Image (cartoon, rainbow, N blue to C red):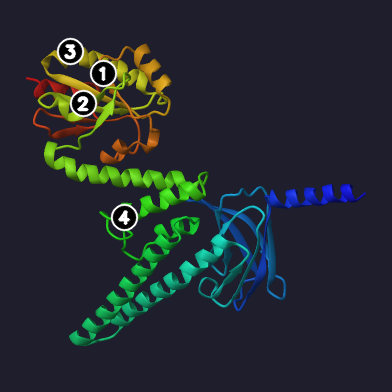
Amino acid sequence: MKKTLLILALGVLMCGCQSTSVKISGRLLGLGSKVVYLEKVTGGDVKLVDSVVLESTGDYRFELSDVGDTPLLYNVVYSGERIPLLLTGGERVTVNTVGSPLRNYTVEGSEESELLREFNKFYVEGLSNMTSILDNYSGNNYSELDKRTLMQEYTHVYRTLKREQLRFIIEHKSNIAAIYALYQRLPNEKYLFSNRDDIIYFRTVADAIEESYPNSPFLPTLRTDIARMEAHKTLVSQIKESGYPDFELPDMYGINIKLSSLAGRVILLSFWSTESGRMGGVNADLKEIYERFSERGFEIYQVGIERSKAVWINVVQEQQLPWISVGDMRGEHSPVLGMYNVKSLPANFLIDREGNIVAKNIYGNDLELQLEKLTM
């Protein structure tokens, strides 16, 4: 009998450890709203998950199922304000607030959500102080001395806030909350720190998250942004040397071929994917143009935006593409897409003998007319 009870107890413990449910409850007071909402944030999409009517005491309760062991971002929405939560399966979370939710809320039962509250406490207060200073500046007829004083105060608040934001990111780099903090921007602020230095913080967080939460859905986005930043740095350094962004990629045999190795020829830099239904016809037209102009100093450098090397090689061989075919097999995360700001496929850039980009996304008769002039 004792053995049976022990087995049952162990089973209950195991079930508890593997729980995928999340319970959120608490009390929201001080505002007139009667309904509280729960949203799930995935990438740039926000989806309404549930809504409940507050009890007369302000109490509410949500329950989620099938939540994994990697924190996902949710918002509790009350009176138009969003309380961000990073939730993991098995958590029992309590969120309370009196008055303005984002400035006054408390959270217990979720380590990552508690870190978000720590971040938001100083970030929201700092943002509010900056807004107040600007309103004061524009709403009164101050002397030049008073205006300079206000701007000095504004600068001090801004620098203090940025210093705290960066401190939080570094101290909590292994937490998903650090990713949230990475992407918070003040009004008119495009970059976290500066375009040149942002990549340091993104890399630091990405490497740490790789260790702590290797399956996090936030990690691919982080890596994509890092690749974009790397491409921008490469673009800035290389465009000075060649007149266009230079790079090198391996062909199907693993031999690296640099774009600038074709200097002195007219180059069509082409981006494509075997998954694009248009590319069969596009490549067929290009083959006719290539056959006509290749002996006049025309070359095609075609980059495959692929994940599968085997599929890519098979299509290149099936279509008997006669030009230079290269690819890094990083798909949409390939840094070269960022270097040329390619948003959709196919895409191409026509480069003259002097290294100037003279046309973009040019095909058919338009391409032939340009080549007639450029290869004379």
Mark 1 Cα-neighbour bin, 10 Å: few <14, some 14–19, many ≥20: many
Residue 284 percent across, percent down from the top left = 31, 15
Mark 4 Cα-neighbour bin, 10 Å: few <14, some 14–19, many ≥20: some
Residue 123 left/right relative to 141? right
Total numbered labels placed on residues in the image: 4
Secondary structure under badge 3? Answer: helix
- Can you tell which mark lies on residue 286? 1
Residue reaching furthest to the left: 376
Residue 290 percent across, percent down from the top left = 21, 16
The mark that comes first in sequence, 3 or 1, is 1
Quickly name the residue at label 2: 268
Quickly name the residue at label 4: 198
- What is the CA distance from the residue labelled 3 to the residue labelled 2? 14 Å
Give the amino acid type for the residue marked by disc 3 in the picture: Arg
301 over 83 or under it: above or below:
above
Quickly name the residue at label 3: 292
- What is the CA distance from the residue labelled 2 to the residue labelled 4? 33 Å
Residue 3 left/right relative to 67? right
The mark that comes first in sequence, 2 or 4, is 4
Give the amino acid type for the residue marked by disc 1 in the picture: Leu
196 over 25 or under it: above or below:
above
Secondary structure under badge 1? Answer: helix
Mark nearer the viewer, 3 or 4: 4
At x 10%, y 27%, the residue is 353
